[in-house]
Amino acid sequence: MSTDKSWIKEWGRRRVYGFFWVFSLLAISNTAFSENDEFLHVIDDYVDIVLAIVAIILILVYWKKTSTKQLKMLNNMLAVLAVLLILITIFAFTQEIDDPEDFGNEIPTLFFGIFMLINRFI
């Protein structure tokens, strides 16, 4: 019985990760092209887009692998990507805090990273 509950929990986490990564890819890609004026202001967005693409590819590659152990491994990899997203966003805070035109997507991106990390442990 506990195996079924843990499988359902890990499977649910994968669905939540899928939603957050796809949504963050769409949201960040919309803002990345408007910040092309300075390299340091746009590099964090491009790295975030690459992280989201890697996460979506991982989800698709592991789509048929549905054992509890494989789902847990996938969710751990996605949590590591969420930590990288948080670290990149913190770096972006230091680069874009003084430019009100470019500092707009960092706070939602930071929240997305935090929510994805919380998803791993709840």
Image (spheres, rainbow, N blue to C red):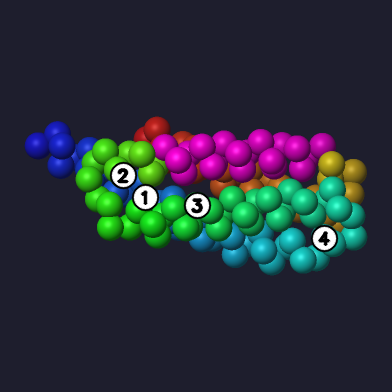
Horizontal and vertical percent for residue 96?
Answer: 84, 45
Q: Which residues are magenta?
A: 76-94
Q: In the picture shown, does residue 31 fall above or below 75? A: below
Comparing labels 3 and 4, the label whose residue is closer to the camera: 3
Amino acid at pointer 4: Glu
Q: Is 121 situated left or right of 64 in this image?
A: right
Label 3, label 4: how far apart the Cα atoms are: 23 Å
Label drawn at residue 14: 1
Horizontal and vertical percent for residue 69?
Answer: 26, 38
Label whose residue precedes the other's in the sequence (2 or 3): 3
Furthest residue toward left:
1
Residue positioned 74% across, 49% down in the render: 44
Label 2, label 4: how far apart the Cα atoms are: 36 Å
Horizontal and vertical percent for residue 25?
Answer: 59, 60
Residue positioned 40% across, 59% down in the render: 60
Q: Is 17 situated left or right of 1 in this image?
A: right
- Of helix, strand and loop, which one carries label 3? helix
Asked whether the residues under the numbered discs 1 and 4 touch, taking CB atoms below 8 Å apart as contact, a structural biologist would say no
Displayed quadrant of residue 26: bottom right
- Of helix, strand and loop, which one carries label 2? helix
Asked whether the residues under the numbered discs 1 and 2 touch, taking CB atoms below 8 Å apart as contact, a structural biologist would say yes
Amino acid at pointer 2: Leu
Label 2, label 3: how far apart the Cα atoms are: 14 Å
Q: Is 11 situated left or right of 42 in this image?
A: left
Residue under label 4, please give it. Answer: 35
Residue under label 3, please give it. Answer: 55
Q: In the picture shown, does residue 11 fall above or below 57? A: above
- Of helix, strand and loop, which one carries label 1? helix
